[in-house]
Image: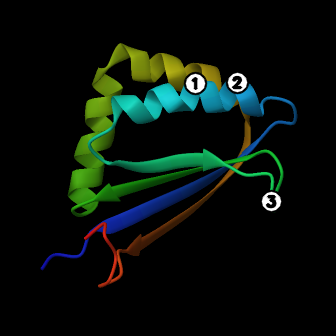
Amino acid sequence: TQRLIIYAGAYNIVQWNLKAVVSTQSTGINLRRDSAVMGMCSQIGQMYTVHHIWRYRDLEHRREARNKAWENGQWADLVVRTVPLIKGLDVNITHAADWSPLR
């Protein structure tokens, strides 16, 4: 069985812009629903942080999914509106565990 790649991004948002980013990025997740696992924010831990988790068959599938998203004008608009509101990004790429329902 092929192990899926899990991509987890944590975006640190400019203070007081969390609601705008969450609203905008929820649209982005819907545009890439085929590889989206979840998007969320939390008031536990680092404040003003949005988390995204994506799943891909492999790195080539990730590249294809991202390129396909850029072909959609709505995705580019979301990125243009969101990037100025992001202070930083932490990314982790791993494999789904053998017991994971994402496999």
Q: Quadrant of the C terminus?
A: bottom left
Question: Looking at the image, which residue is at 30% across and 66% down?
Answer: 102
Q: Categorize mark 1 by other alpha carbons within 10 Å: few (<14), some (14-19), many (20+).
A: some
Q: Are marks 1 and 2 in contact (CB under 8 Å)?
A: yes
Q: Quadrant of the N terminus?
A: bottom left
Badge number at residue 44: 3
| Mark 1 lies on residue | 24
Q: Is residue 60 left or right of residue 74?
A: left
- Residue 51 placed where, x, y %? 60, 51
The residue lying toward the viewer, choosing from 43 and 9, is: 43
**Extreme-bottom residue of the structure:** 98
The amino acid type of the residue labelled 3 equals Ile
What element does badge 3 sit on? loop
Relative to 72, does residue 93 appear above or below in the rendering? below
- Residue 23 placed where, x, y %? 61, 25
What element does badge 2 sit on? helix
The residue lying toward the viewer, choosing from 53 and 80, is: 53
Q: Categorize mark 3 by other alpha carbons within 10 Å: few (<14), some (14-19), many (20+).
A: few
Badge number at residue 20: 2
Question: Looking at the image, which residue is at 75% across and 34% down?
Answer: 18
